[in-house]
């Protein structure tokens, strides 16, 4: 399982024509949600194949529901495994959350932060890892309520990672959003994570409600405090591959590349300091 290095973008169908026409060198890799591409034929399948010839691709799933009460969808997992093999993709990440209960709920909901939930989730992670024959990479998800919590989000995340051997997708924006909404220190949260377990990072924008609640939307530009937190993350854990997410209100590719260049600049700054020391 070889993780691409550098800075990446989320691959959206509306970007395909421009990506294939311009082949932007600023993008080191592309991330896609496999559920949005499974079974595609014709034009989109051909375009995806051309992108995969030029860039490394990674998969970031939406529907595994690792913490859900329903049995794991092994048919979906088999489809994703075939899709990855067909497109020579070796990286698969998902959300540490759930999205199904007697059927899909079409939202990412928080797993209760309890010891029993840790045991339950670890068993399901190990089932996925045994099937894929590689570590599952799990993202710290944004959440707005913590029903029945018996431990902190950080304690829950660390126990799941340590007991399952999974890897982590550290979403820096989610960390900032959760820290503001639930009144904890985002930097202390990031410092407590094991560097070796962090496979890559996500960056994104969010929305602030009138009452001050932050909503993780992936529909806006990254704000300065989240950029600052990314720099601090690099200082603590070293440079990690970093993906810029934009799921709606998608601006022209040139604007996304401008934000992506900021990630690359921060990565180079940290590497230059490391090389000089």
Image (cartoon, rainbow, N blue to C red):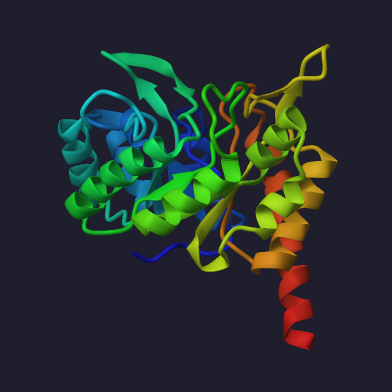
- Give left or right: position of 197 versus 91: right
Judge whether 88 appears above or below 213 on screen.
below
- Estimate the x, y position of residue 134 in percent, counting from the top left: 28, 59
Q: Could you tell me which quadrant the N terminus lies in? A: bottom left
* Total numbered circles: 0
Residue 30 position within the rendered picture, expressed as x and y whole percent measured from the top left: 48, 48
Would residue 54 be visible to someone looking at this image? no
Answer yes or no: is residue 152 visible.
Answer: yes
Residue placed at 70% from the left, 58% from the top? Answer: 233
* Residue 239 drawn at (x, y percent): 64, 66
**Observer-nearest of 145 and 208:** 145
Please, is residue 31 above or below residue 163 in the view? above
Viewport quadrant of the C terminus = bottom right
Q: Residue at x 33, y 36 (%)?
A: 34
Quarter where residue 238 is shown = bottom right
Horizontal arrangement in the rendering, residue 236 relative to residue 5 (left or right): right
Write the residue at 79% across / 78% down. Answer: 273
């Amino acid at each position: 399982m070889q993780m691409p290095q550098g800075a990446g973008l989320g691959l959206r169908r509306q970007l395909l024509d421009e990506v294939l026409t311009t082949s932007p060198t600023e993008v080191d890799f592309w991330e896609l949600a496999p559920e949005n591409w499974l079974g595609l034929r014709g034009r989109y399948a051909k375009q995806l194949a051309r992108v995969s010839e030029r860039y490394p691709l990674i998969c970031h799933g939406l529907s595994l529901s690792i913490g859900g009460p329903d049995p794991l969808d092994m048919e979906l997992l088999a489809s994703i495994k075939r899709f990855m093999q067909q497109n020579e993709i070796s990286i698969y990440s998902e959300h540490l959350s759930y999205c199904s209960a007697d059927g899909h709920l079409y939202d990412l909901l928080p797993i209760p932060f309890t010891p029993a939930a840790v045991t339950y989730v670890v068993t399901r992670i190990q089932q996925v890892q045994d099937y894929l024959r590689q570590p599952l990479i799990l993202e710290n998800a944004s959440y707005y309520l913590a029903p029945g919590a018996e431990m902190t989000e950080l304690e829950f995340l660390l126990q799941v990672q340590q007991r399952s051997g999974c890897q982590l997708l550290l979403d820096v924006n989610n960390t900032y959003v959760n820290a503001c909404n639930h009144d904890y220190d985002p930097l202390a949260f990031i410092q407590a994570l094991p560097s070796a377990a962090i496979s890559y990072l996500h960056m994104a924008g969010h929305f602030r409600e009138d009452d001050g609640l932050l909503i993780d939307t992936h529909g806006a530009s990254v704000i300065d405090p989240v950029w600052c937190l990314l720099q601090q993350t690099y200082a603590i854990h070293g440079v990690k591959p970093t993906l810029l997410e934009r799921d709606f209100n998608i601006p022209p590719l040139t604007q996304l590349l401008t934000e992506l260049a900021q990630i690359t600049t921060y990565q180079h700054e940290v590497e230059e300091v490391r090389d000089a020391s």
